[in-house]
Image (cartoon, rainbow, N blue to C red):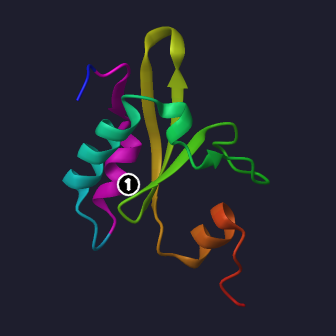
Amino acid sequence: MGKRKFKVTWSAEAIEGIGQLFNVNARQVIRNSKHILSNNPYSSAFGIANFPGYEFNGYFWIYINNVILIYNVKSDYKLVSIEACYSALTGEVAEIFYGISPDG
Protein backbone atom coordinates (compact mmCIF):
# COMPACT_ATOMS: atom_id res chain seq x y z
CA MET A 1 0.00 0.00 0.00
CA GLY A 2 1.25 3.48 -0.82
CA LYS A 3 1.73 6.41 1.49
CA ARG A 4 -1.44 7.71 3.07
CA LYS A 5 -2.51 11.12 1.82
CA PHE A 6 -4.76 12.15 4.73
CA LYS A 7 -4.52 11.76 8.48
CA VAL A 8 -7.74 10.34 9.97
CA THR A 9 -8.78 11.43 13.46
CA TRP A 10 -11.78 10.64 15.63
CA SER A 11 -13.49 13.29 17.78
CA ALA A 12 -14.11 12.48 21.44
CA GLU A 13 -17.85 12.35 20.71
CA ALA A 14 -17.37 9.81 17.91
CA ILE A 15 -15.15 7.62 20.10
CA GLU A 16 -17.72 7.75 22.88
CA GLY A 17 -20.48 6.95 20.38
CA ILE A 18 -18.78 3.89 18.95
CA GLY A 19 -18.11 2.65 22.45
CA GLN A 20 -21.84 2.61 23.11
CA LEU A 21 -22.73 0.51 20.06
CA PHE A 22 -23.56 -3.14 20.68
CA ASN A 23 -22.26 -5.95 18.46
CA VAL A 24 -19.64 -3.69 16.89
CA ASN A 25 -15.91 -4.34 16.92
CA ALA A 26 -14.83 -0.74 17.60
CA ARG A 27 -11.15 -1.41 16.97
CA GLN A 28 -11.91 -2.91 13.57
CA VAL A 29 -14.14 0.01 12.59
CA ILE A 30 -11.48 2.53 13.63
CA ARG A 31 -8.74 0.62 11.79
CA ASN A 32 -10.85 0.23 8.64
CA SER A 33 -11.89 3.89 8.70
CA LYS A 34 -8.26 4.98 8.82
CA HIS A 35 -7.33 2.63 5.98
CA ILE A 36 -10.24 3.61 3.72
CA LEU A 37 -10.41 7.34 4.38
CA SER A 38 -6.69 8.10 4.42
CA ASN A 39 -6.28 7.65 0.67
CA ASN A 40 -9.28 9.38 -0.90
CA PRO A 41 -11.99 10.47 1.51
CA TYR A 42 -13.98 12.20 -1.23
CA SER A 43 -14.53 9.19 -3.48
CA SER A 44 -14.99 6.86 -0.50
CA ALA A 45 -18.08 8.74 0.72
CA PHE A 46 -21.49 7.15 0.22
CA GLY A 47 -22.99 10.64 0.21
CA ILE A 48 -23.16 14.07 1.76
CA ALA A 49 -25.53 14.59 4.67
CA ASN A 50 -28.46 16.79 3.69
CA PHE A 51 -31.36 16.00 6.00
CA PRO A 52 -33.89 18.39 7.57
CA GLY A 53 -32.56 19.71 10.87
CA TYR A 54 -29.47 17.46 10.91
CA GLU A 55 -26.49 19.04 12.70
CA PHE A 56 -23.93 17.50 10.31
CA ASN A 57 -25.41 18.65 7.01
CA GLY A 58 -22.65 19.15 4.47
CA TYR A 59 -20.47 16.45 6.04
CA PHE A 60 -19.60 13.23 4.24
CA TRP A 61 -20.89 9.85 5.40
CA ILE A 62 -19.72 6.30 4.83
CA TYR A 63 -20.83 2.81 5.84
CA ILE A 64 -18.10 0.67 7.45
CA ASN A 65 -18.69 -2.59 9.36
CA ASN A 66 -22.37 -1.90 10.17
CA VAL A 67 -21.55 1.63 11.31
CA ILE A 68 -22.36 4.93 9.62
CA LEU A 69 -19.50 7.41 10.08
CA ILE A 70 -19.97 11.15 9.64
CA TYR A 71 -16.79 12.97 8.69
CA ASN A 72 -15.39 16.29 7.55
CA VAL A 73 -12.42 16.76 5.24
CA LYS A 74 -9.98 19.61 5.78
CA SER A 75 -8.03 19.57 2.53
CA ASP A 76 -5.60 22.33 3.49
CA TYR A 77 -4.43 20.23 6.42
CA LYS A 78 -4.81 16.82 4.75
CA LEU A 79 -7.07 15.84 7.64
CA VAL A 80 -10.21 13.72 7.89
CA SER A 81 -12.12 14.26 11.12
CA ILE A 82 -14.75 11.68 12.08
CA GLU A 83 -17.36 13.59 14.05
CA ALA A 84 -20.13 11.07 14.78
CA CYS A 85 -21.13 7.45 14.29
CA TYR A 86 -24.34 5.45 14.36
CA SER A 87 -25.30 1.82 14.20
CA ALA A 88 -26.38 1.12 10.63
CA LEU A 89 -28.80 -1.52 11.89
CA THR A 90 -31.50 0.83 13.18
CA GLY A 91 -34.70 1.90 11.50
CA GLU A 92 -33.88 5.55 12.08
CA VAL A 93 -30.58 5.26 10.21
CA ALA A 94 -32.25 3.35 7.35
CA GLU A 95 -34.77 6.14 7.01
CA ILE A 96 -32.33 9.05 7.33
CA PHE A 97 -29.42 7.82 5.23
CA TYR A 98 -31.10 5.47 2.76
CA GLY A 99 -34.65 6.85 2.59
CA ILE A 100 -36.08 3.47 3.59
CA SER A 101 -39.09 3.62 5.90
CA PRO A 102 -38.79 0.96 8.63
CA ASP A 103 -42.59 0.74 8.78
CA GLY A 104 -42.94 -0.39 5.19
In the rendered view, tell whether residue 93 sits above or below residue 70.
Answer: below
Q: Which residue is mark 1?
A: 17
Question: Between residues 22 and 65, which one lies in front from this camera angle?
Answer: 65
In the rendered view, tell whether residue 63 sits above or below residue 11.
Answer: below
Is 8 magenta? The answer is yes
Report the quarter where the N terminus lies. Answer: top left
Question: Where does the image place residue 28, in percent across and percent down from the top left?
Answer: 22, 54
Q: Is residue 83 left or right of residue 55?
A: left
How would you rate the neighbour count of disc 1 (Cα within 10 Å): few for under 14, some for 14-19, many for 20 or more? some
- Under circle 1, the secondary element is helix
Residue reaching furthest to the bottom: 104
Question: Where does the image place residue 8, in percent across and percent down from the top left?
Answer: 35, 29
Question: Between residues 5 and 29, which one lies in front from this camera angle?
Answer: 5
Question: Magenta span covers which residues?
Answer: 4-21
Question: Between residues 62 and 103, which one lies in front from this camera angle?
Answer: 62
Question: Between residues 32 and 9, which one lies in front from this camera angle?
Answer: 32
